[in-house]
Image (tube, rainbow, N blue to C red):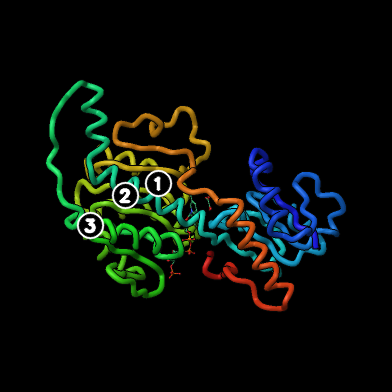
Amino acid sequence: MTLLFKSDLERYDIWLPALHKHLDGREVRLWPDVGDPSDIKYALVWQPPAGFLASLPNLKAIFSVGAGVDHIAADPERPLHLAVIRMVEEGLTAGMTEYVVMQVLYHHRNMLAYRRQAEQRIWREISQMPAQQRRVGILGLGVLGQDAAKMLVRFGFDVAGWSRSPKQLDGVACYHGADGLGEMLARTDILVCLLPLTPETEGILNADLFAQLPRGACLINAGRGGHQVEKDLLAALEAGQLKEATLDVFEQEPLPEDSPLWDHPQVVMTPHVASMTMPDTAAKAVAENIARIEAGQPPLNVVDFERGY
Ligand code: NDP
Ligand code: OXD
């Protein structure tokens, strides 16, 4: 069994030992050194070039290095008969929960306003509401959304979440479907996007959605840049409909040099690093799924491309 790994080249030196450790002596090849393509049984990839997966004739399954699989769906030549398995691993989940909690606290505790005050040497207290009165709404109650929601509940926030199908989660007000979205938005001071990018969710963070939030709400987008309509976002910030935003993802990545989002006074930006797949725990998850496939069992976390995620 040979596994082909393709990710950011600079991360190969930490991935390779992790893959060797968990794949039990099986061969690992690093893209672009594919060797004989017919040897490759599994591909673990991030942003594979279009047509690359189709060039591996004996491929049995495709593993995504990331939780999102839009980078694989974007390949028009992707072999449609093969299972695509999204990344679910504890390191990636923990990293996202850290990021979401950090950013919710940042907005909740008025840190952007204090940063602006400090730039002007202003020593002034801003009134603070307790977490119990701060309503956080999470778009996407999947692996990442649920974990973040649980931690925010522990901090005492008034937490709600929205998904496609109905959910029940301790301490979280759960909404679903088109009707549920408006209800959740109306009770949300800090909106967190942890959705997958699909035809249904593309452009969801737009003027119409912002208008359904209470005036002065904050947005945290750690999903995908394709979720946000940046001109609507800038207009909502300008108009005060949105007070502040944290953006980890952008319509175009890397963010173009001339984007006003780089140094917008109401925006916290990070370069698509809200969470990162952690090689050791991820390689373990991949190895376990390969063992299931080799034992004739169905793999876990297979993408349903009918739903788009
Ligand atoms: P999951 O598939 O576990 O969860 C997706 C959630 O979104 C589910 O609750 C699902 O509903 C909901 N959803 C999907 N489509 C719709 C819709 N049309 N309407 C309402 N709800 C919908 O994904 P993960 O939690 O593992 O990951 C979520 C996303 O986070 C990834 O796809 C990726 O885009 C992003 N991500 C970003 C990272 C970063 O560094 N910025 C890092 C990792 C992930 P249901 O439960 O009913 O299926
Ligand atoms: C992911 C990402 O999808 O890092 O995992 O964006």
Q: Are marks 3 and 2 in contact (CB under 8 Å)?
A: no
Residue located farthest toward the bottom when viewing the structure as drawn: 296
Residue 298 in picture, x, y percent from top left = 65, 76
Residue type for callout 1: Val
Camera-side residue: 117 or 288?
Answer: 288
Residue located farthest toward the top when viewing the structure as drawn: 121
Q: Which residue is mark 2?
A: 207
Q: Are marks 3 and 1 in contact (CB under 8 Å)?
A: no
Residue type for callout 2: Ala
Q: Is residue 180 visible?
A: yes
Label 2: how many Cα within 10 Å (few below 14, some 14–19, many 20+): some
Q: Is residue 51 visible?
A: no
Q: Which residue is mark 1?
A: 229
Residue 212 in picture, x, y percent from top left = 25, 56
Q: Are marks 1 and 2 in contact (CB under 8 Å)?
A: yes
The residues tagged by marks 3 and 1 sit, at their Cα atoms, a distance apart of: 23 Å
Q: For this view, does 90 lie left or right of residue 176?
A: right
- Seen in the picture, residue 110 relative to 265 is either above or below; the reply is below
Residue type for callout 3: Arg
Label 3: how many Cα within 10 Å (few below 14, some 14–19, many 20+): many
Q: Which residue is mark 3?
A: 135
Mark with earlier residue (1, 2): 2
